[in-house]
Image (cartoon, coloured by chain):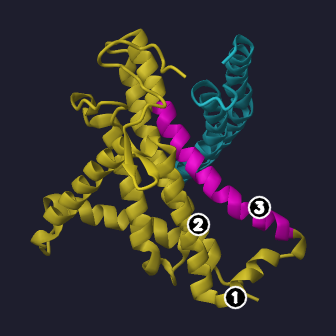
Amino acid sequence: MAPLPLALPFAALEVGQHLYWQLGNFKIHGQVFLSSWVVIAALLAVVVVGTRRLERDPRGVQNLLEFLWDYLRDIAREYIGEKAYRDWLPFIGTLFLFIFVSNWGGALIPWKLVHLPSGELGAPTADINTTIALALLVSLAYFYAGLSRKGFRYFEYYVEPTPIMLPFKIVEDFTKPLSLSFRLFGNILADELVVAVLAFLVPLVVPLPVMFLGLFTSAIQALIFATLAAYYIGEAVHEEHH
Amino acid sequence: MDSLTSAASVVAAGLAVGLGSIGPGIGQGTASGGAVEGIARQPEAEGKIRGTLLLSLAFMESLTIYGLVVALVLLFANPFS
């Protein structure tokens, strides 16, 4: 189907148009890879710069990184629990930082300056493949967390408090990644669409408040994804006290 | 795509977002009202209440977003075209 008929140069919107790369038998969305490489490079650069000369009194980038680390540790500790959070802090932190920088990068980096033959650059999280990959990683992570910590006792969780809960808990394993991925994808795409439609109607000043709202919701979505991932892992490693 | 399918898709997309926002709207109103009451009763707990409120608002928000995803699929990736 044809993309939305938006013709203004700074508000063009191409839904469903992709830059396809052929990789073996797969067609992959090249624009997502390009923008996520930029995001990964930016994150790596900040971390390398911030940790190159560590000081006892943190200043500048090191200060920012220590603040972030504290923040993420608090999330992980609150939801995973005192015993297991250290193993999962890197995972939760990486998820949060990647999603956060992707969301904000999609809104703040002037991607329009780069012209692609097809499709457009934007937030990597506005593509459903990225979010489904992240959500499936979370699924694998909490299964691994539960099985490695409790062994086959992990499956007791499915029949607690009563075996009547078994079907619901099994369905839950499928709805967890579904809702995680759709929530992130829908929010980011909706944000970009609303800004694009408003910018098409009134190109100046008027879209600004919506853009700020978009920045706010994207930050909250990153927090929610990380929080839920931590919560699911915490649920899997939680020991019942009898 | 024939005109009947596209007309039905557009109507359905509108309904998906419109109907899907009723429930979360009511829920978000109730939740925010409860949070305001809580803050009025205990102003020192404002920070904690705000954090929980934002998180739960985002959960409710995602229900509308599911409707939006359905609408977007109908408009841009229609399986019946």
Chain coloured yellow here? A
A95 up-or-down from A218: above or below? below
Image mark 2: chain: A
The residue wearing badge 2 is: A139
Q: Amino acid at mark 1?
A: Phe
Q: CA distance from mark 3 to mark 1?
A: 19 Å
Q: CA distance from mark 2 to mark 1?
A: 17 Å
Q: Amino acid at mark 2?
A: Ser
The residue wearing badge 3 is: A171
> CB atoms at circles 2 and 1 under 8 Å apart?
no
Q: Which residues are magenta?
A: A165-191
Residue A165 horizontal side relative to residue B40, left or right: right
As drawn, the residue found furthest toward the left would be A53
Residue A78 horizontal side relative to residue A11, left or right: right
- Mark yes or no: residue A160 visible: no
Image mark 1: chain: A
